[in-house]
Amino acid sequence: MVIQENMTPKEIVDTWEQTAEVFNQFSIPLVHDSLGSFMEEGILEKLLQELNQVVGSSSVTCVEGG
């Protein structure tokens, strides 16, 4: 599964505990709002890349709908 902007920081950390450090680096609280609802686009893209790198996921390793 690829971490996406419609996911919340709380859900992401609950699923992948190792992502908590990335949220700390970006100073993002573990809230229940989706990432896309409160983050600027440029920072969001960097955050998503970093999070997916930490969990070893990318669009190459995942298929749409699965």
Image (tube, helix red, strand yellow):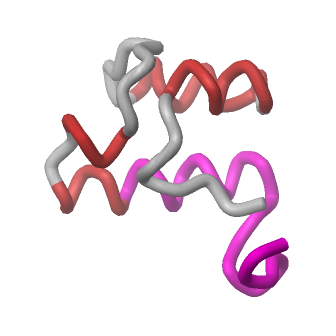
Whether 27 is drawn above or below 55: the answer is above
Viewer-side residue, 52 vs 35: 35
Q: Residue at x 54, y 52 (%)?
A: 50
Q: Is residue 14 above or below residue 66?
A: above
Q: Is residue 10 left or right of residue 32?
A: right
| Percent coordinates x, y for residue 46 in the rendering | 37, 57
Quarter occupied by the N terminus: bottom right
Q: Specify the segment rendered in magenta.
A: 46-66
Q: Is residue 56 magenta?
A: yes
Place of residue 15 in the rendered image (x, y in percent of width and height, measured from the top left): 78, 29
Q: Quadrant of the C terminus?
A: bottom right
**Residue 59 at x, y = what percent?**
68, 80
Q: From this viewpoint, which residue is outermost toward the front?
A: 65
Residue at x 63% of width, y 26% of height:
11
Q: Residue furthest left?
A: 40
Q: Is residue 13 magenta?
A: no
